Amino acid sequence: MSDPTKLVFVGAGGHASVLYDIVTEQNYIVQAICTKPSGLISHVFKKIPLVKDRLDPVEFDPDNYKLVNCIGHMPFSTARFDVWNEYKNLGYVFETIISPRSSVSDFAYLDEGVQVMTNATINSNAKIGANTIVNTGAIIEHDVKVGSSCHIAPGAILCGSVSIADGSFIGAGATIIQGVNLQQDTIVAAGSIVTKDS
Amino acid sequence: MSDPTKLVFVGAGGHASVLYDIVTEQNYIVQAICTKPSGLISHVFKKIPLVKDRLDPVEFDPDNYKLVNCIGHMPFSTARFDVWNEYKNLGYVFETIISPRSSVSDFAYLDEGVQVMTNATINSNAKIGANTIVNTGAIIEHDVKVGSSCHIAPGAILCGSVSIADGSFIGAGATIIQGVNLQQDTIVAAGSIVTKDS
Amino acid sequence: MSDPTKLVFVGAGGHASVLYDIVTEQNYIVQAICTKPSGLISHVFKKIPLVKDRLDPVEFDPDNYKLVNCIGHMPFSTARFDVWNEYKNLGYVFETIISPRSSVSDFAYLDEGVQVMTNATINSNAKIGANTIVNTGAIIEHDVKVGSSCHIAPGAILCGSVSIADGSFIGAGATIIQGVNLQQDTIVAAGSIVTKDS
């Protein structure tokens, strides 16, 4: 087996703890966690060194460390998107994280830094944009297009050929029926049934 | 390992591409795809020979090839059912397709040509009729009976002892509570909560 | 492999049949089923000896047999809770049952007798109380707390940091958004979207 990929987590709260679960089953090693002094720190991280505020690209060379954006994505918050921009500007690459207990089609396309959580399904010919979360148990059917920096929350269902533009939030348990197109920055409340374009 | 089962797909659109994903992980080989000249053709099929309009039982002997009904099932469309009838009359058998990442009880009963997609669950003592789709992430609880040529769309939930008669469509993310009986050709909209018999 | 754990099922209906499916894939052996003469008996149990009414702790020594509470949990019924109390008073231990096709975080905490059914997910730092069912395909996100003797019905979704007190019933396909707290004995109807504390 090749050397494990060295990761640095940015963020240390609940979403981070789920990602930690997922990467520690695979050939990764989490070298450090970067977190604001004010941020939540899940107790699952007590054995991992903390880096305060921001990474130093000299200490953590972008050629040797890949990042994981561990900030959750909630409506009306840009925190996750800000982390992405800040570290892309410093030359870092965000690792694409796929739970070994998710199901991603060989004919699906995941861009940089996509996170596919446990029991999620991504079917044939789906395209998922950079920095997007496909959360626990979410269903992405065939021919769906999801833009960058979206959050498909736990248990949400995107039927065939749905298209969702950048920055959108699809709440937990929401259902988007086939062929619906949602504009940039659309927010769909948890449990909603969406039958028309936004 | 025994020789792979030789399949011919009837239909080449989105549902076909998901089925293709599922069969290519298993001991199957897709020999040809039969499609109307007007039909959608998913680009995942570019390396597989196309057969136009209908199969010739001389070229594709029903004793050597099993069919997969790859036409999706939408409300008010009989296209999927028509394919079933047309090829059953020619003597073909439809293969039952079970995603290796679904969960089907040893005590469940699947009739000819049932399709169980990824992350679906079919629990103990459930019975699923011929030509029915149990789509991605759908949940079929214990003692459920689903008739023939039904579509249980992605993420739909049929609680224990539900009974659904032939030709019905249960939309994505719908929930049918325990013990409900739905008549033939019932259509349940996406996300509906069904608490009474139809 | 060590000797299989010897189980006695209490209850023989639909929920029992699903549990039977789950334990027979693992290193368990179901030695007997205890059921009221009036109770439903799933036909999957026809080869297993029936014990009527209640177990005799002389014949089934609590040191040698672990119990599985196979009574389903429906709103307004105490039957499942009564079984728990009756046999705990006799000195029995209830086995925690985890479907091999569920996903339970190494950082989650399950108390005695929890039942995690197929395709359910329990994420990091979740705590599940004794005698609770996390049913088929349910999603328990990070930092969720579920009390004892609850039922999270099939496909229900508990978002991050939800807290649900003892004896509650969360209906099939219900969604509880992040951070909501539900009091003891709360009943959430199937498919509900809960956005406020009870």
Image (cartoon, coloured by chain):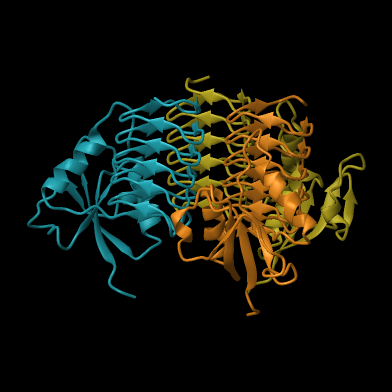
Chain colours: A yellow, B cyan, C orange
Image quarter of residue C62: bottom right
Q: How many marks?
A: 0
Image quarter of residue A142: top left
Is any atom of residue A90 visible in this view?
no
Q: Nearer the viewer, residue B5 or C64?
A: C64
A181 w.r.t. A114: above or below: above
A78 relative to C18 in the view: left or right: right
Q: Residue at x 66, y 43 (%)?
A: C79
Q: Nearer the viewer, residue C103 or C26?
A: C26
Q: Nearer the viewer, residue B173 or A169?
A: B173
> Farthest left residue?
B58
Which percent across, then down, holds residue B82? 19, 37
Which percent across, then down, holds residue C182? 77, 31
Which percent across, then down, holds residue B120? 47, 48
Q: Residue at x 12, y 46 (%)?
A: B89
B116 w.r.t. A167: above or below: below
Q: Residue at x 48, y 20 (%)?
A: A196
The quadrant of the rendering that contains the N terminus of chain C is: bottom right
A21 w.r.t. A193: above or below: below
The quadrant of the rendering that contains the C terminus of chain C is: top right
C195 w.r.t. C117: above or below: above
Which percent across, then down, holds residue B17? 36, 47
A134 relative to B25 in the view: left or right: right
Is any atom of residue B196 visible in this view?
yes
